[in-house]
Amino acid sequence: MVAPFLPDDEKLAAIRDALPALGAGIYLNTGSVGPMPAETAAAMAELVDYELRVGRGHPADWDAFLERMAEARAAVAAVIGADVPEIGLVHSTSQAMNAAIWSVTLGRGDRIVTTQAEHPAALGPVHLAVRRFGAEIAIADVGDGGDDERTLAAFDAAITERTRIVALSHVLWTSGGVLPIRAIAELAHRRGAVVVVDGAQAVGAMPVSVRDLGVDFYALPGQKWLLGPEGTGALWADRAIVEASQPWNGSSFTFARLSPLEAVVHPDARRFDDSGHYRPGITGFARSCGWLSMYIGLPWIHERGLRLARVAADRLAAIEGVELVTPRRQMATLVTFRVAGWTPDEALAELGSRAFVIARTIPDLAALRLSIGFFTTNEEIERVAAVVELLAAHTPASLPPRPHLTVIGAGSR
């Protein structure tokens, strides 16, 4: 456990020791999947061992699992400023987006508005709903997401009186631009639309208060910035819209009462719960959320992550031959950039071999993306920038040979 009151250097060292994956290299891909805390892995392993030795069939085991679900629901609520009954537990962001989009009744000629930069987790459910109901899709071109005036103008043009759903990301997974969600939600609501937000690149990386955003649904994953296991996620649903929302599927968790003659769904967001949760996964999801909020502190996490992301963006933007794609004026913790003369795959391979950088490319933008975590160090940012400088000063054919490198330790700062 990491005490929130430790001096900053000691706290960072303790955090890095508690995240063993940081010892494998410079971990800059939390936007895909974050490093898991040792405490989370231990809690999951303990339950796996119990299930192996004792089994999973005793009624008391089921009761214990329901307690872990309640714990996960409460842990998520604490992270996003919600009430516990407003949280539905699902398996992924895409499943949460499906649950929200399919809960709205659509008719032929109705419209769903989204952006040109959505992740498949949002875009897929939108297209399927449009296809199923004979609705139409409208695209708001928000560019890199860094110009609020452009973004609002694009949504103003796309949202008509026939618009039933506006589905968009809080932080664009491509450029890392942060969209003005509250202003978009106000515009959408004036025209009678429901607002569904993909929060995959926001929750855990930056402050999120779902109530202050003024949206109707907010989807989030467990495995990214919340550092939980894969196969976990949640959907926040505003109380005001739940009663009018239809469950997207029927599971054993959907209903308050279910019999051959009646089917009464839960009056709160539990109507969006899916079944078949992996019990150690739900346990790990709750543990990671609690580890972040109680033992590190979300304000510290958010402040440090956002500050270091700006440091990284400024450092890269200052390198001749580097084009920063992320809008510095409106960014979270994703830093996307291009290196002149290099394909993203070539540049990523060199970063991996020369500095053990764990990152990813964004093929649609022909760019690389770094996910800057609260656990990232200034030294790591500088090591990455030094390699990028080397690449920018050479072509792939003229690059000097790769030196032998030693993997940095988990406790390095």
Image (cartoon, rainbow, N blue to C red):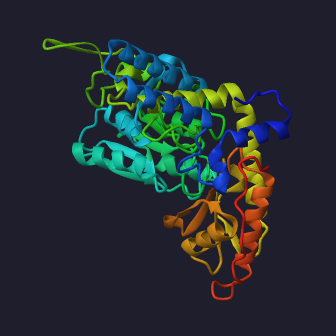
Q: Residue furthest bottom?
A: 398
Q: Residue furthest front?
A: 53
The spot of residue 286 in percent (x, y) is 53, 27
Horizontal relation, residue 251 to residue 385: left or right: left
Residue at 55 percent across and 36 percent down: it is 41
Vertical relation: 28 (above or below) 225: below
Residue at 30 percent across and 27 percent down: it is 247
Q: Quadrant of residue 391?
A: bottom right
The spot of residue 185 in percent (x, y) is 52, 35
Number of numbered tags placed on the structure image: 0
Whether residue 297 is visible here, answered yes or no, is no
Front residue of 348/84: it is 348
Vertical relation: 99 (above or below) 361: above
Front residue of 356/162: it is 356
Residue at 79 percent across and 61 percent down: it is 382
Q: Quadrant of residue 278?
A: top left
The quadrant of the image that shows the N terminus is top right
Vertical relation: 262 (above or below) 117: above
Front residue of 147/48: it is 48
Residue at 65 percent across and 62 percent down: it is 357
